[in-house]
């Protein structure tokens, strides 16, 4: 039987999982932009995390650690030190998401509007049993009415054909919104830019531990 984690260990775990949640959204964005496809379980968990208003941990927001496997693997790969071309876009999207999160935290008006719109979308989802495709369309509109108002834009690269598909564009905006939501969990757990720089090895070790001990095979 595993012994309970100490408070510092719990905090370190939440930081790693929150960062993995950010990465998961951006990995899925990259998949859709290049191929039009995304891992279904991770996609659904990321989008549904936007409605986990009362969640206090990343596991609660994502419905369990197994729904974060794509993000944990993606974070491990980003921190591995191996500079493969396909990871550059994901890293760029992550940095863009963290920048937008910082802007949103300093903008109470937009943050309040975003929260209200998400709460309305959650009620609509609950009452009408909306599927992920319709939900993504609603979330895309919310993104355009809030986050897209900032001068800073995340430039998505991939297949022109896939990027011109309205359904793909809606899913991409929804996932960027989910990654921004995950950035709040990262900040809430004490995550910061300097931790990314100076605690890279610890984060990398934790991703390997999580994949080795907690992700179902």
Image (cartoon, rainbow, N blue to C red):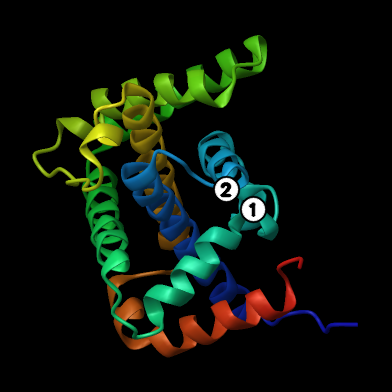
13 to the left or right of 191? right
Which numbered disc, 1 or 2, marks the residue that appears first in the sequence? 2
Tell me if residue 115 comes above or below residue 180 in the rendering: above
Q: Looking at the image, which is closer to me, 58 or 56?
A: 58
**Mark 1: secondary structure:** helix
Tell me the tag on residue 42: 2
**Mark 2: secondary structure:** helix
Residue 82, percent across and down?
34, 84
The quadrant the N terminus occupies is bottom right
- Residue at image point 30% right, 75% down: 84
Tell me if residue 88 comes above or below residue 61 in the rendering: below
- Residue at the far left: name it: 151
Tell me if residue 119 comes above or below residue 186 in the rendering: above
Residue 105, percent across and down?
29, 47
The quadrant the C terminus occupies is bottom right
Residue 62, percent across and down?
62, 48
Location of mark 1 (residue): 67
- Residue at image point 25% right, 26% down: 144
Count of numbered circles on the image: 2
Residue 149 sits in quarter: top left
- Residue at image point 44% right, 61% down: 186
Residue 129, percent across and down?
66, 15
Please report contact status of discs 1 and 2: CB closer than 8 Å, yes or no: yes
Q: Looking at the image, which is closer to me, 118 or 7?
A: 118
34 to the left or right of 216? left
Q: Looking at the image, which is closer to me, 137 or 49?
A: 137
- Residue at the far right: name it: 1
Q: Looking at the image, which is closer to me, 196 or 25?
A: 25
Residue 192 sits in quarter: bottom left
90 to the left or right of 202? left
**CA separation in Å, label 1 and label 2:** 6 Å
Tell me the tag on residue 211: none
């Amino acid at each position: 039987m595993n012994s309970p984690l100490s408070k510092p260990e719990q905090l370190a775990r939440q930081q790693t999982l929150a960062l993995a949640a950010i990465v998961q959204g951006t990995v899925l964005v990259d998949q859709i932009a290049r191929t039009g496809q995304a891992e279904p379980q991770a996609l659904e968990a990321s989008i549904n995390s936007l409605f986990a208003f009362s969640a206090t941990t990343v596991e609660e927001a994502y419905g369990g650690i197994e729904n974060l496997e794509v993000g944990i693997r993606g974070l491990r790969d980003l921190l591995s030190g191996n500079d493969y071309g396909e990871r550059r876009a994901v890293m760029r999207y992550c940095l863009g998401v963290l920048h937008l999160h910082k802007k949103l935290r300093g903008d109470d008006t937009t943050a309040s509007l975003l929260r209200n719109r998400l709460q309305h979308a959650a009620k609509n989802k609950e009452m009408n049993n909306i599927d992920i495709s319709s939900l993504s369309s609603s979330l895309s509109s919310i993104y355009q009415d809030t986050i897209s108002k900032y001068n800073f834009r995340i430039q998505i690269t991939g297949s022109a054909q896939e990027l011109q598909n309205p359904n793909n564009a809606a899913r991409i905006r929804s996932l960027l919104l989910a990654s921004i939501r995950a950035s709040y969990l990262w900040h809430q757990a004490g995550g910061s830019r300097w931790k990314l720089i100076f605690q890279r090895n610890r984060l990398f070790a934790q991703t390997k531990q999580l994949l080795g001990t907690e992700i179902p095979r």
